[in-house]
C-alpha cells in the first residue's frame, strides 16, 4: 500500500481515477477520517467528474459504517461547499469535497475542511490521515451505523450570502461573456444570472461535463481563454470571465480580450473592499508584482506578503485579520466568506468596481501594468534545495530585501520608502507544492532589466 502515499498532497488528495482513486480507496478513506478526525457529523459534496458520484457514495459508506452521520449536498462548487460549511456555524465537524479542481478529466480527488472551515492539509492533519490510511491496523467495530440526510438548500444559502455584500441595484447594464469550462460553475451561473437581470451573460460551456470536452478548465492558462476572448471581441462585451473546474478560481479578460493576471486582479478586487474596510490588511503571495502592494497602499490599505498555497494563506488571513488575499494563480480569499475562495463573489466585486469607477476593465488595469513581469517559469532540477541555496549565496550581498517564507524572494534597488532605482528588479524562486520543479518569476522596472535578469538566473538554474 505504500505506493498510494503519493496521492496525499500538501493541500488535498488527488490522482488518476479510477486507476488510483476508486470506490475501495474512498470507502477506506471514509473509515480513516472517522477514526483520525473523530467527527460526529460530516458534510459531503462532489463535482461533476465521471467518477465523483461513485467516490462520494463509497466515502459516505465508509463514514457511516464507522458510526458517523453524513449530510450530503450532492453536486456543488467548492465555494458553495465551503460557504455552506461556514453558514452551518459548527454543526459539522468535518467537510469533504470530492473534486480534482482544475486537473484534467482523468483525475479526481478529495479536499478536506474542519468544522471552522479551516483547510486540512500539510501541517494541519493531512499527515495523520495519510499515515492511518497506510497502516494495516484494523478499524474499530462500531455498534451503531451513522445516517445520511440530504441538504437541498445549499445553493440558495450560498448565493444569499455572497449577494448580501454587494449592492446589485447599483450595477450598470452591461454584456459579459462567461465561460464555465463545463465545470461546476455551470450549476451556479444560471441562478446568479437570475439575480442580475441588468447583466447580459453570454454563456460558454455551461453544461456540466466531467470530460471537459472543449478545453481544460484552468483560467491561468492563456489557451483556456481563447474562446471567451473571441466571444468578447465578436459580441462587444465589457469583459470576459473564465472559471476553473470546481469554481474556486476565476480569470478575467478585458473588453479587448486581453488577460488580466491574477496578481493585478488582487489589486483590483482589493479596491472596492477597502472602500468599506479602510486601513485594513490585504495579503498577496510572493509571486505578485510590486504594483499590488503599491495599489493597496494607494487605496488606504495595508499589505503583507504570504507563501503560496490556499491552506497557508487561509490560515494567515484568519490569524492576521486581513479582509482579503489573492494569488497569482487566481485564488481570491475573503474574510466575509470564512477566508475561502469564491469566483462568484470575485465577479460581483469586479462588476461593483466597474460601476463605482465608470471605467472599463482595461482602464482599471493599465495603471497597474507598469513593470515587466516574466510569469512563472518551470525548470526540472535534480536537487532543488542546493540550487536555491547557491543562488541565494550568489545574490544575497546585492539584495535590498530577502524574503524566505516560501523558497526565496530577493528584491534589488529598492529603498526603505519603496522608491526604486532605474535598474530595480526582484525574483522569486521556490519549489512546487504539486510538481517536481523549481518555479522562477522575475520582475523588473523595464522589459530590458527583466529579460537580462531572467536569462541570467535561468542559466544558473539549468546549468
Image (cartoon, rainbow, N blue to C red):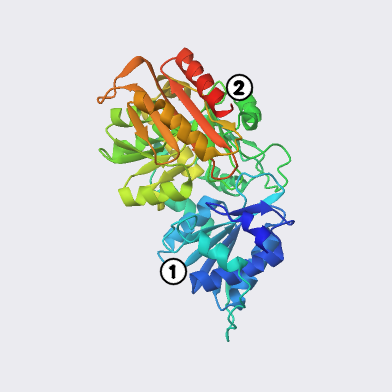
Q: Which residue is mark 1?
A: 91
- Write down the residue under mark 2: 233
Q: Nearer the viewer, mark 2 or mark 1?
A: 1
* Image quadrant in which you'd find residue 76: bottom right
Q: Nearer the viewer, residue 18 or 457?
A: 457
The front one of 145 and 202 is 145
Residue 143 spot, x, y in % from top left: 58, 87
Label 2 secondary element: helix
Q: Quadrant of the N terminus?
A: bottom right
Question: How far across and down, in percent of the image, does residue 438 sit?
Answer: 55, 36
Task: Give left or right: position of 442 versus 280.
Answer: right
Q: Could you tell whether 232 is left or right of 308 in the image?
A: right
Up the image or down, 155 lies above or below 371; here it is below
Splitting the image into 4 quarters, where does residue 69 fall? bottom right
Q: Residue at x 73, y 57 (%)?
A: 18
Q: Residue at x 43, y 41 (%)?
A: 406
42 or 31, nearer to the observer: 31
Amino acid at each position: 500500500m505504500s505506493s498510494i502515499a503519493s496521492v496525499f498532497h500538501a493541500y488535498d488528495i488527488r490522482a488518476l481515477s479510477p486507476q488510483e482513486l476508486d470506490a475501495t480507496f474512498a470507502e477506506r478513506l471514509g473509515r480513516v477520517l472517522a477514526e483520525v478526525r473523530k467527527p460526529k457529523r460530516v458534510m459531503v459534496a462532489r463535482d461533476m467528474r465521471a467518477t465523483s458520484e461513485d467516490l462520494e457514495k463509497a466515502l459516505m459508506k465508509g463514514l457511516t459504517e464507522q458510526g458517523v452521520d453524513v449530510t450530503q449536498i450532492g453536486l456543488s462548487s467548492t465555494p458553495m461547499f465551503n460557504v455552506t460549511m461556514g453558514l452551518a456555524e459548527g454543526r459539522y465537524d468535518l467537510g469533504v469535497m470530492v473534486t480534482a479542481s482544475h486537473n484534467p478529466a482523468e483525475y479526481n480527488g478529495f479536499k478536506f475542511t474542519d468544522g471552522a472551515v479551516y483547510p486540512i492539509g500539510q501541517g494541519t492533519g493531512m499527515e495523520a490521515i495519510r499515515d492511518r490510511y497506510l497502516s494495516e491496523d484494523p478499524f474499530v467495530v462500531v455498534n451503531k451505523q451513522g445516517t445520511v440526510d440530504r441538504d437541498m438548500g445549499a445553493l440558495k444559502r450560498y448565493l444569499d450570502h455572497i449577494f448580501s455584500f454587494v449592492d446589485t441595484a447599483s450595477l450598470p447594464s452591461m454584456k459579459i461573456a462567461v465561460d464555465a469550462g463545463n465545470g461546476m460553475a455551470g450549476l451556479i451561473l444560471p441562478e446568479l444570472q437570475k439575480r442580475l437581470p441588468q447583466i447580459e451573460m453570454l454563456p460558454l460551456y455551461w453544461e456540466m461535463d466531467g470530460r471537459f470536452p472543449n478545453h481544460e478548465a484552468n483560467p491561468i492558462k492563456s489557451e483556456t481563454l481563447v474562446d471567451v476572448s473571441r466571444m468578447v471581441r465578436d459580441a462587444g462585451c465589457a469583459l470576459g470571465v473564465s472559471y476553473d473546474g470546481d469554481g474556486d478560481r476565476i480569470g478575467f479578460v478585458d473588453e479587448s480580450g486581453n488577460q488580466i493576471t491574477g496578481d493585478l486582479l488582487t489589486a483590483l478586487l482589493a479596491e472596492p473592499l477597502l472602500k468599506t474596510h479602510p486601513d485594513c490588511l490585504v495579503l498577496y503571495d510572493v509571486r505578485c508584482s510590486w504594483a499590488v502592494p503599491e495599489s493597496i497602499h494607494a487605496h488606504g490599505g495595508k499589505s503583507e506578503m504570504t507563501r503560496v498555497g490556499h491552506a497557508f494563506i487561509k490560515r494567515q488571513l484568519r490569524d492576521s485579520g486581513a479582509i482579503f488575499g489573492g494569488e497569482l494563480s487566481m485564488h481570491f480569499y475573503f474574510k466575509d466568506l470564512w477566508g475561502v475562495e469564491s469566483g462568484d463573489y470575485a465577479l460581483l466585486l469586479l462588476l461593483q468596481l466597474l460601476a463605482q469607477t465608470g471605467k472599463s476593465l482595461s482602464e482599471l488595469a493599465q495603471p497597474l501594468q507598469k513593470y515587466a513581469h516574466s510569469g512563472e517559469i518551470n525548470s526540472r532540477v535534480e536537487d532543488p534545495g542546493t540550487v536555491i541555496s547557491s543562488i541565494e549565496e550568489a545574490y544575497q550581498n546585492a539584495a535590498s530585501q530577502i524574503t524566505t517564507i516560501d523558497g526565496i524572494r530577493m528584491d534589488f534597488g529598492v529603498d526603505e520608502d519603496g522608491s526604486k532605482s532605474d535598474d530595480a528588479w526582484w525574483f522569486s524562486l521556490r519549489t512546487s507544492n504539486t510538481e517536481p520543479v523549481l518555479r522562477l518569476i522575475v520582475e523588473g522596472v523595464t522589459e530590458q532589466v527583466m529579460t537580462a535578469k531572467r536569462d541570467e538566473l535561468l542559466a544558473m538554474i539549468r546549468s
